[in-house]
Amino acid sequence: MKPEPVQPFDWERIFIHEFPWTYLGEVAFRTVFMFLVVLAALTVSGKREVRQLSIYELVLLIGLGSAAGDPMFYHDVPLASAVVVFLVIMGCYKLATYISDRNKTVRTLLEGKPVYVIENGCILTENFDQEDLGLEELFSDLRVEGVEQLGQVRTAILEPNGQLSLFTFKENDVRPGLPILPNELKRHAESIPQPGDYACCACGHVKTFSASVDHSSCQRCKKTKWVKAVK
């Protein structure tokens, strides 16, 4: 038996389908009920959610979101089932974080470890290339912290939660470095037009050229794009 064809812009079907209008009261009750359950679950889970999400929080919120959504408006999804799902998810979350906090191997495997990405104004390309972080994203994070060029950066560490920990030189110790402002980076070239300090666009290594040079390679990363270093 073929289903009846759908009538476009059937407002009754769009808004209420075959349910009685009084069913909207039950939907409101279900929504309030699941809101309170979600609120209680996140309260129990602690303060981890106020920070950038780790893998555990991400799994937790995906699970809670899936469990909370359906009972809010599907009449054939009992609330008791959603509560059981919440309890199991929270139990798994607590167990996983308990094991991770007490077992360094498990924590490193699942969450990763801090990675040095910049030292003394130079990008550690051997570490940086292994991370899921683009150069533009790194520069964006640095600009948010008020950094204009890599010579200001003593150390930058990519934390397991994806945040960038930044340690800068004191003002008197700042050295010439790779400019990370977009308009400055656009001025890169493979030829050195005149003597001076130039920074490699790939790793930030600064080299002093005593004369103009064509296609000079960086001694650290072997790239050939340079831009005038700034301080």
Image (tube, rainbow, N blue to C red):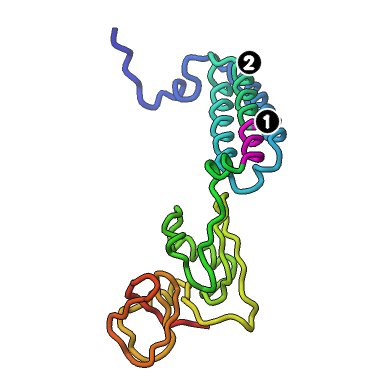
The residue that appears at 32% across and 75% down in the rendered structure is 224
SS assignment for the magenta stretch, majority: helix
Say whether residue 229 is visible.
yes
Q: Nearer the viewer, residue 67 or 164?
A: 164
Q: Is 60 placed above or below 155 here? A: above
Residue holding disc 1: 41
Magenta stretch: give its range.
Answer: 94-103
Instruction: Give the quarter of the image for residue 103.
Output: top right
Q: Secondary structure at mark 2?
A: helix
Does residue 194 appear left or right of residue 148 in this picture? left
Point out residue 74 in the picture as x, y percentages from the top left corner: 53, 19
Residue 80 drawn in magenta? no
Q: Amino acid at mark 1?
A: Ala
Point out residue 93 in the picture as x, y percentages from the top left corner: 62, 32
Residue holding disc 2: 80
Is mark 2 in CB contact (under 8 Å) with mark 1?
A: no
Q: Secondary structure at mark 1?
A: helix
